[in-house]
Each structure stands twice: as C-alpha cells, then as structure tokens.
C-alpha cells in the first residue's frame, strides 16, 4: 500500500480485516516494524478519536508519532497553484509538504470540506496536493469527501459480529440519514457506501429524506429509498449518520425528528446492531435508549479505530 | 489504589510520601512497571505544572503519555444525563469516556468549577461521570473542588523538610488566605485542608478574612481564625493561597493587601517555610522578598509534583 | 556548549557543520547520548519547522521531548523584575523557569520581538531571564533578534553545496531584502549576518532598500549596498528574506515588487543557489519560477534543520 485515501487503496478488504483482528489480539506483535520510523499527524481540522487512535496505532508498531495541529499551532496553508500570497495564507503546500516528506516516513492528514463549493471539495485538492508534494506515503485522517479509516473500522466491526454467528447468510446493512443541528460533511456516508459496496459481502440499503442523495460515485450498487421503515425491515446492521445535501450542496433541508432511530423502529429490524462513527448528538441523531442499550456497537467501533489505523500503517511500512 | 481523586483514596499517606522520596532518589527504578501501558491526560482546563509533571512521571515509569487538550484540540463535552444535545455540546461523556477506557490504561483528567453554582461544582459531576463511564482508573489532575496531586506534593515537601530536623515536635502548619485579582476555586485550599487533617501529624490552623470560610467537610479538625497575626505565631510552615468565597459562592469580598505575606509578618513565625502551589501573582499574593528569600519552598514543591504523580501512577499500576 | 542563543556560543562553526553532516549520514549513531534525558520545548510564539525539527533531533539522540505551547496551553508570563502582578500576566519567569529547570535537562525556547520597542527587543529580556532563572542549558528556538539554529542550518547547507565543487574559491553570498505584506522581525537577517561574518569563509554582501539597515552589531564586516543588481553580480548564494526597519523600528517603508527575486535577476549571478528560511510568501517574496526551479535550496535547508538541532543538543549533552 502506498497511500490510503479511499477504498481504492485497499486491494483485499478481508485481508485487512484479518490483520486488524490479529493486532487486536496482540497489539505489540509488530513492535519492531516501525522502529526508527516516524509518522507526522497533521490536523487542519480538530480530531479526538482519529488523533488518539492513530497515535496509539503508531506507537504499537514502535513508530514515533508527532501530532501537529495546524491553525492552533501553525499557520494557514495555501493550496492554489500560482497564488500570489499577499493575503492570509502564509505558506504554500508546495513548500510545506516536501519538508514533512523529509521529517517523516509517513504523513497522516486531516483536511475538511468547505461545504460551499462542491467542485472544490470533491476535487480533494488539499489531500491531493499533499500527496503530490510530500513524496512519502499519505494516510487520510478524513478528507473533504471520504473517511477511509472510519470505514475500514466499520467493516472490521461488522466482520467481528458476523464471525460470532452461525450460518452464511449475507447480512443486511442499512445506512440511514439522521437529523442534526448543523450542516455536516458527506464524508462518513460516502466512505461507508464506497467500502460496503467494494467489500460486496452484504445486502446494502441506503435511506434518507428526499433531496439527500449522495454522489453515485460512491453509492452505485446499493438500494436507495426514502422510506426508512421499509429500509430497516430485517436489517442486521443500521449505520446512523447525518449528512448535508449533496446536489444543492451543503444545505440542511430536513430536521424531522421522525428520522431519529428509536427502539420502536428497531423492532422492524432483525434485532439489528446499531453503528455510529461518533461523536453523536444524543436524542437528536440517536436516542439514549439505543446508545445505552445492548444493540449499540459504538464503543466497539471507536475502539477498533486503533486496529484499523495499525493495519494501514503496517501495510505501508511493510510495503505491501 | 483504584482512583485518585481525594485524600480518601490514600490509605497510608506516609507510605506514599516514602515511595515518592524513593522515586526522587532514583527516578527510573520502576521503568518496567508501565511498559506497554498508556495514560491519557485530558485537560478540560489549561495546565502547565500538572501537565508536565504527570507526563514526566508516566515516562519515568515507562508508560506512554498522551496529552489531549479538550477545547483547543477537541470539542465541548456534555455531562448531563438525558440531555437533548441540540445546543453547543457535541459529545456526551457517556460516549467519550468508554472510548478513553479502551484507548488507555489510566485516565488522568483536569476539570474545573463554574464558581457560579455551588451544588453543581461540589457534586463533582464531571470527574464522577468519567469514573462512572471510563471503566479504567481515573486520576484527578484537579477537579472542581479538590487538587489531590498538589496536596500529596505538599505533604511530601513538608515531610522532606521535617526529616532534616532533630526532635519530634509536631510542626505547626498555617493555611493563610491571600489577596488576588480574580475569583479562584477553593480546590487547593480544600484539598490541602483535607490532606493535612487526614495526615494528622501537625497542628493545623487556617486563617482567612470573615466570610471566606471553606467547607467544613474538609476543614473539620483545624483551628480557624480571622486573625492572621495570631495564626502565624510560631508557625513552621505557612501555606499561602487565595480562594473565592464558599458560602455566598464564588465571590471576591476582600482584596486588602494587608493579607499579603511579607518578611515582617514572617517574624511572627518560627522562621517558617513558605509554600504556594503556583502560579503566584507576585506582590499581590506573595511579596518578592519572600519568594526570592531563603524561606520559600515553592520551587521544591513544584519539582516534587513529579514524584507525587509518579507515586500515584505506580500505586495504580501495581494494583496496590 | 552551555547555552545556544547566538553565534558567540559556537566556538568552531566548521566543527559543528561536520558533526551535523555526520548526523545526516547516520541519524541514530548517538541514540544513547540522550537516554534518560528530557528536553522541554517552550513556544511563546508558534512554530512548525523549528518545533518539528527540534523534537525529531531530540528523539534521534534518545531524549524525550516535551512540547509546551504557552498561550494556547498555558498562560501569560511576566518578565519584568519587581512587577506587581495585578494585570494580565499570571506567572513570573522567576517562578516558572526554575521549575522547567527541575523538570528538564535542556530548555529550548521560542520568544519573539514586540517590533514596537527596539531597546526592549534588543535587550533580549525574555530569553535572558530564562537563562538567568532556569539553571539548565537554554537553546534559542528564535528569540527577539536572532535565530541561531536557522543560521547554523544555513551554513551547513552552504557547506554541503560547496563540498560538491572543485576548487577553493571563496563563495560570494548575498543576503537580499525581499518584499512582504507585514512587518517581520530582523532575527533571521541579523543572525545570518552574524554567522556568515563569524564563519569568515565567504565574500558577504547585504542589499536592501534605503532605510532598511540592520544593526551593525551583526553586519559589520559585510559589504552593504542599496543596489540589488550590483549585489547579485556573480553571487553563488542568494539568501532572500524580508525584515522590517531597524532604525525607525518595526516599520514597513517599502513593498516595491522589483525587490522580488526572479529568474531574470538570477541571470546576474553565478547561477546562484537560492535560499530562504521558510515560510515564504510565493510571488511576493520569491517567485514560483525560482522556488520550483533547480536553483532553490529551500527544502534542503529546511530538512537540515534537524541536523543543526541535533548537533547543538549533542554538544550540550556531551558538555563540549
């Protein structure tokens, strides 16, 4: 693996899952793999789970991890080619990235979307410029449109739960939109769709209010419906997530609480496990009763973030 | 030791003191104790001494320490049960704490009081919620009402100085209120009172202006007087600290400079050593002449913070 | 080496250069030198390259590096003697520095100039107070008027390039002022001048617009001219940097784009290598064509920051 910015970088998802579970069973088994290696974790947007899990994953592999919060610790970066930098940006990615490439063996970056200009966000200019100019492997810690470490984590978590079951029935996975108080990126939903589709081991349904269609680039292959109840029927996993509109970009059209998952709605499912990437707005996105109940996988998911990150770093370090 | 949030968690204060002094003599003697273990240091309020000393203490024990500044790096946490999170808080402690419990072996947290609602602050909701939901040992790096690592440090420092003396006379320790320009928590004063009382090896006097009574929960057992001169008489240690009012909560009634300790006042004492937890407002709380003079223990105290933290982490790691 | 705050702390610049290049060839060769040692990196002003390179340098030597961003993580320090601290500063350097001296083996500090009061800035009060009160070696990560780690890096970079050449002709080095959008410190220009003069192995020319004279304390020995074209003639190295005025302190008199280095101007030189400490405002200070062209040394310079820092820490650790 050279870079890790989308499902396209994962040639064998099940292989990654197995590796992740082997790290979960024995976190320090590859402690020498990263000895003398250094990862730079660059945050253009704040992070808690991603930051901590990546740092821990690197340490488990014997790497030194250095966190740098751009903005609070650093300065505004310029990403446009040929910019005349007489404004607020103080350093061009063309100058900064090669230096990260000299200081580190792997560069992990969190960027973010504007939610104002769809073309800009979906061009993934920021992370692509880092890849272009850093000269070392780049790992996405969430970009403008995707969040691959989260999605690998999600597949790991589903696989873990599937392994407990007898039989070989394909699970039904439902990605459902949920209400929120502000406009959020489509990253997690895009990325989950992309990974579940590429994984190909589930019946995959996406449900959301009208006008909340995601990009077909990621959803193609899934069944899409505006009828949440129908979607939930016999589901084995319900993945809950808010996102803002894609077509008329970055808007919030809908906040109807009826889209919030509750225990009543869960009765429609096959006693489905409930997933969310966190952070979650309790009693807005997801009810207390579900989050505090036996069907919630959210803590398991978040703790699996370490093993997903460790797997990706391990693949890159071993040049696989 | 399971958690460390108050003197009640210390069964044998003198035993802790001896352990701390043994670490001071040989910082790396238990370097293997924390190998492969990880401490998360979570700051909901900024910190310098506490952050650095805890990080160093963990490293001395071979642990990996990860610092996370909530607020500047993260997001606003919700602590109320059943909250409908449509406001400013973005993640509930019920969701965040279990994840810290998966990522770390020990969780160290600094919370803070509102100084507006006494019942809320004295319920210690924040740190108790972390203990309830993290599932791993929790160490207070200062909470709304107490600062036990500081107080353990203070007892260590007093013990070190007592060991230099011949004879077995109980020392007289005076906690004196000092002026300040803003309303400060009662934490350090509460905690110092609690620890000195539980330690039981000193004559303990507290002096402050009228209406600055601390909670009897912590002070019971000490002699309390509004006459600073009388309190200082024959003192062996004078602990200087400002706090805001407790009864009529969080107010500043008094800023009379006559409460500031000076060399003249020190003449009333038994050539007392002067203590302060730092940071100190020079020439407001304490005069230059004392801080720069031979009676000041403030640097010794601050440097002992490392050994107090190392002792507590060691006790937790070894399950004592 | 006890402290490292100016060229005066470097007794043998060529010796430092050779040591740096030996670390570049074998970064971990002195990994045991810093074992059990700790460096505190204290930033009163933000930093990217300096922060990362110092942290990496320390790790390469086996030291533990702890970064503390004063301001975002800490609080405002007081530097004036006898201050009555009833204002915004919450801790005096007299109280903070000795504690850093207890927590760390080496203290590295970035301070900054006001650009308002020349006497204050050039007195270097901040870093001198840290040296006075910390009691351990102090390394400047840039101070109010100097940036010695940058300058050592620059000499290393020039030496590397000189070693590739046949012959023994002294190189011609030109420091040229460049336009910028805001008032910047004189640190880098002062420091580069001080180091090149002390090194003594180059013909050194400084060029800038009228009224941009630097302090003679640092420039004495160099040829100074307001004619950039004349200065550039036959240059082997052109060091590009903006600074604000020194005499009428901290002003921006000039922003004429004709002072920006371009390929056309480079034709006047001996195919000169172009240097800049970064961050650089593209197409304001330096043109894209130069930064992206074969003559630019800026990435090499920035990557050499690690070896400069490692050399200085190594000298201090080994007490040379």
Image (tube, coloured by chain):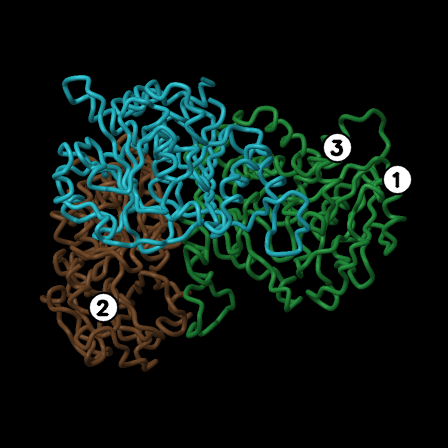
Chain colours: A brown, B green, C cyan
Q: Mark 3: few, some, or many residues within 10 Å (few <14, many ≥20)?
A: few
Question: Label 2: chain?
Answer: A
Left or right: where does residue A167 sit relative to residue C252?
left
- Front-most of residues B40 and A26: B40
Tell me the residue at 70%/66% (across/down).
Answer: B251
Q: Position of residue C175 (x, y in %)?
A: 28, 37
* Residue position for label 3: B294
* Residue position for label 2: A175
Quarter containing the C terminus of chain C? top left
Q: Is residue A150 visible?
A: no
* Residue position for label 1: B234
Determine contact: label 3, label 1, CB under 8 Å: no
Question: Label 3: chain?
Answer: B
Q: Is residue B139 visible?
A: yes
Numbered circle sitting on residue B98: none
Q: Position of residue C87 (x, y in %)?
A: 63, 56
- Front-most of residues A200 and B165: B165
Q: Within the image, what quadrant is residue A295 found in?
A: bottom left
Answer yes or no: are tags 3 and 1 on the same subunit: yes
Circle 3: element type: loop
Answer yes or no: are tags 2 and 3 on the same subunit: no
Tell me the residue at 30%/33% (across/down).
Answer: A29
Left or right: where does residue A262 sit relative to residue C258?
right
Q: Mark 1: few, some, or many residues within 10 Å (few <14, many ≥20)?
A: some
Which of label 3 and label 1 is nearer to you?
3
């Amino acid at each position: 693996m050279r870079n890790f910015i989308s499902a396209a970088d994962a040639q064998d998802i099940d292989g990654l899952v197995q590796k992740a579970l082997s790290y979960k069973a024995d976190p320090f088994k590859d402690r020498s793999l990263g000895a003398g290696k250094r990862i730079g974790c660059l945050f253009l947007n704040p992070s808690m789970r991603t930051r901590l899990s990546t740092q821990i994953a690197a340490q488990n592999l014997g790497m030194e991890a250095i966190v740098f919060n751009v903005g609070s610790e650093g300065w505004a970066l310029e990403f446009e080619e040929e910019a005349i930098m007489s404004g607020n940006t103080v350093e061009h990615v063309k100058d900064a990235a090669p230096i990260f490439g000299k200081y580190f063996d792997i560069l992990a970056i969190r960027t973010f979307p504007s939610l104002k200009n769809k073309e800009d966000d979906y061009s993934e200019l920021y992370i692509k410029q880092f890849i272009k100019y850093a000269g070392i492997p780049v790992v996405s810690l969430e970009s403008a449109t995707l969040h691959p470490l989260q999605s690998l984590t999600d597949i790991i978590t589903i696989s873990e739960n599937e392994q407990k079951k007898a039989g070989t029935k394909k699970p039904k996975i439902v990605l459902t939109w949920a209400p929120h108080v502000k406009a959020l990126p489509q990253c997690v939903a895009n990325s989950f769709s992309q990974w579940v589709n590429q994984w190909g081991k589930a019946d995959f349904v996406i449900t959301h209010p009208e006008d909340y269609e995601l990009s077909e680039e990621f959803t193609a292959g899934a069944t899409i419906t505006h009828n949440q109840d129908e979607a939930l029927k016999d589901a084995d996993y319900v993945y809950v997530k808010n996102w803002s509109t894609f077509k008329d970009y970055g808007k919030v059209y809908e906040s109807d609480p009826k889209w919030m998952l509750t225990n009543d709605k869960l009765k429609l499912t096959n006693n489905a496990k409930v997933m969310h990437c966190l952070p979650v707005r309790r009693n807005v996105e997801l009810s207390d009763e579900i989050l505090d109940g036996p069907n919630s996988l959210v803590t398991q998911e978040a703790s699996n973030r370490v093993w997903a990150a460790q797997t990706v770093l391990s693949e890159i370090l071993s040049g696989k």
